[in-house]
Each structure stands twice: as C-alpha cells, then as structure tokens.
Amino acid sequence: QVQLAESGGGLVQSGGSLRLSCAASGSIFKFYPMGWYRQAPGKQRELVASITSGSSTTNYADSVKGRFTVSRDNAKKTLYLQMTSLKPEDTAVYYCNVDKAYGYEYIAWGQGTQVTVSS
C-alpha cells in the first residue's frame, strides 16, 4: 500500500519560489501517473499539475502554466513541484496523489503542505 507525505511548504512573499516534495512509500509508485492538487479555504480541491509514470508528459492548469514545474524521481519514489513567481492566489494546502484521468483511484491522502503567499 502506497502512503504519501508532502513537505516543503511555507510562507513566501509574492514573486518568490518554493519547491514541494512528495515522498511515497511502496514499490509501485513508479507505475502511477501523479498529480499535485491544491485546496484553498472555501474552495474545492483542484489539480494543478500532473506527470506520467515515465515523465514523458506533463500537464498544468492554466493558472500555473509557465510558473510551476512538476517532476519525479522514481528511484527515490519522490514527486516534486517547483513553484516560481508565486502569487497570493497560490495560497492553499498542496497535496500529491494519482492523476485520476488515467483511470486510477486515489491513494489515501497525505496531510498536505501549507503554502502561503503574502502580497
């Protein structure tokens, strides 16, 4: 069974950068297309970036395109999200999980990591 643990969040000024990490347990991480999701207060959780199992394809929400970069290291069983040019509207709890668009069911959600961008 795969477990997920996000880290790397924090408080940053507008225009700043952060790098999030998602450490996965279990040997099957490498087979999953993965995504980064975020949930702001009072809003639904949304998918902001995804990457296929072999890193051949990445996709981004329009709101983060050109500013965020998703990557993964299957040997380390870790998913990354490099965030640059951060905006106050990026403030949210960020989670990693499978990308359901490929037909997988969600793994149990981790605790997430809080990203707060001040103006």
Image (cartoon, rainbow, N blue to C red):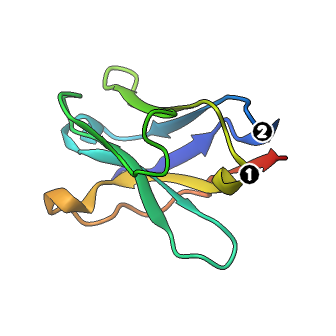
Q: Position of residue 61 (x, y in %)?
A: 39, 51
Query: Furthest residue to the bottom?
Result: 42
Task: Choose between 108 and 80: the one closer to the eye.
Answer: 80
Q: Residues within 10 Å of mark 2 (few under 14, many from 20)?
A: some
Q: Quadrant of residue 60?
A: top left
Q: Residues within 10 Å of mark 1 (few under 14, many from 20)?
A: some
Amino acid type assigned to the residue bearing label 2 in the image: Ser
Q: Residue at x 49, y 45 (%)?
A: 64
Give the residue at mark 2: 14
Task: Choose between 109 and 33: the one closer to the eye.
Answer: 33
Task: Choose between 47 and 95: the one closer to the eye.
Answer: 47
Q: Position of residue 30 (x, y in %)?
A: 24, 34
Q: Residue at x 45, y 33 (%)?
A: 66
Q: Residue at x 67, y 56 (%)?
A: 89
**Mark carried by residue 88:** 1
Q: Quadrant of residue 54?
A: top left
- Would residue 20 be visible to someone looking at this image? yes
Q: Relative to 90, is 23 on the left or the right?
A: left
CA gap between label 2 and label 1 equals: 6 Å
6 above or below 109?
A: above
Q: Relative to 30, is 15 on the left or the right?
A: right
User: For numbered disc 2, what is the local secondary structure?
Assistant: loop
- The answer to the question of whether label 2 and label 1 lie on touching residues, with beta carbons closer than 8 A, is yes
Q: Position of residue 41 (x, y in %)?
A: 70, 72
Q: Relative to 42, is 103 on the left or the right?
A: left
7 above or below 108?
A: above
Amino acid type assigned to the residue bearing label 1 in the image: Pro
Q: Position of residue 96 (x, y in %)?
A: 46, 50
Q: Relative to 105, is 16 on the left or the right?
A: right
